[in-house]
Amino acid sequence: MKELLANIPLVYFLYVRKSTDVEDKQVLSIAAQIAELKEYAARMGIYTVDVIIEKQTAKKPGRKKFNKMLECIEAGEANGILAWLPDRLSRNSVDSGKIIYMLDEHVLLDLKFPHFWFENTPQGKYMLANEFNSSKQYVDNLSLNTKRGLREKVRRGEMPGVVPVGYINDVRTKTAKVDKRLAPIVREAFELYARGDKRLDEIADFLYAKGIKTKSRKVGGERKAGGKPYSRNRVTRILNNPFYYGHFRYVGEAYEGSHKGIVSKRLFDQVQTALERRGKPQRKAKNEPKPLCGLVYCSCGMMFTAETRIKRQKNGNVHVYTYYRCTRKSKTVVCREPHIRAEELDKQLTELLSGFAMPTAWADKLRELMRNDEASEKADFVRATGKDKQSIAQLSDKLQRLLDGYLEGDIERELYQVKRAEILGQKKRLEEKIEQATVGVLTWVGPMTAWFERAVSICKIAKSDDLLAKKSLLLEIFGSNLKMQNKEVVARDDQFPNSPLKPHWQALRAAREKAALAGDQISESSILVPRAGVEPATLSLGRNSSIQLSYRGDTSYCNCKHP
Ligand SMILES: [Zn+2]
């Protein structure tokens, strides 16, 4: 056999490989490998038929060109391989085994490496197997080291892996940067869900409408098309990812991140409560509907709850009544508050809510005023900081000239140090000044815009049967401070919770009341007259300006086109 094989001419494939992975960092470039191997082949009289270039890692089996090469060898196109070192051929046990098996079967007759001795004998194959093993071990060690690196990263507050939507992986600094375009959308999704009246599907639709959708990806070798709304699971994973408030989870543990959060911990917690509440299986018809529970307190201080009664008449008719009543849990007060029918409670609450509906014409006018304020505040800011920015640039120039002078030997070391410290101090002070001016600039715009939308939406919601939406609005306006007294919902001004929006809601209601008293015909341009003054109907917009809600207005509160 051996003599027979000795007469077969040896034909080699020249195989070069370098991946971008860490394990190949020290390896010669592909061009250098080819050059050296060709030179070696010429010197040793090795006949090569083709050069095969691969840019893939050999950590795992499945390299395309490598597999194709083995197929060609099986087909008899060549019977040897020339490579830089055995680890170019394989770093995993499957490919290593394949090569040794092909050598055993005399399909592959020879391997040549300039820096590694190989002979197709039991001893040669033993040495080769050893070499393959150590290159596999090298990869294993590397992955261990990588894990160690990851732990170090986590300790520094950096989450290993891909950042969630709303962030960008900054390749340069290797940190997570807030995505200026998507982060506000993600924050809005949190805010929407925190209100408690949106389903996960609706959040997915909201994200989809704003351009946040699935990407195409590979699943089991097949490419799955993207461009669809996120699944409920995916939305849940976003809504309970602590990354968004500045922490992150890694292997089941929570860590403080070094990245900036895009939602507050408070908002995050509200969302968790909403997730928990909505995640519970809905109880069956027996206890439904009770969407208005948790909103109204009894005059005795206890909560109101819902109850359903079924009335069967003798003629077979069945009536189902829902009413709300005091839980009567007080041990000190004997409560005499009667129950109230669900329809009646809904009617009263709707009436209360309607008092806060913002007519679209008012909103349009207010938005316009707001845009003006926004523009002028922006201009103020640019004006105020522009000079400082200029000064900073000048100071930087000065520093550079100072350094040049020092390097040229024109300035003494001591003087240089004193001067430098002085300039750096000036620069730092200016930078801090700008930083302080930036805080608070235009921060009112987002909440204000959202408030307009909420206030305008009241009209539509008040006319609907969407009890959850009504409840969420009433909770926003009054907190859980609505009381029942003799079958009447009582809402006093001191019942408003102390929220930043409190003056807005109060101003809006006062404006609506005045409009109703005025009873004039509507004249769109005069609905709102910006005026100085501190009346209850003053709505402060920006830092500097406030406008008064005034009107010669429409008496029917809504002139929008809702059904
Ligand atoms: Zn009571």
Image (spheres, rainbow, N blue to C red):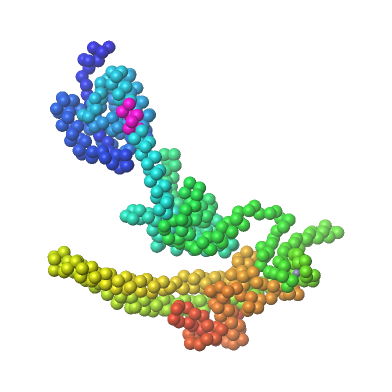
Residue 357 in percent (x, y) is at: 58, 75
Q: Nearer the viewer, residue 529 or 535?
A: 535
Q: Magenta stretch containing residue 519, yes or no? A: no
Q: What residue is drawn where x is 45% and y is 51%?
A: 214
494 left or right of 393 in image = right
Residue 251 in percent (x, y) is at: 48, 46
Residue 509 in percent (x, y) is at: 59, 79
59 left or right of 367 in image = left
Residue 224 in percent (x, y) is at: 44, 45
Whether residue 255 is visible: yes
Q: Residue furthest front?
A: 414
Stretch in magenta: 130-136
Q: Nearer the viewer, residue 355 or 398?
A: 398
Q: What residue is drawn where x is 78% and y is 69%?
A: 332
Q: Is residue 550 above or below residue 136?
A: below
In which quadrant of this rendering is ligand 1 seen?
bottom right
Q: Is residue 490 above or below residue 204?
A: below
Magenta highlight: main SS:
helix
Which image quadrant: the C terminus? bottom right
Q: What residue is drawn where x is 65% and y is 72%?
A: 481
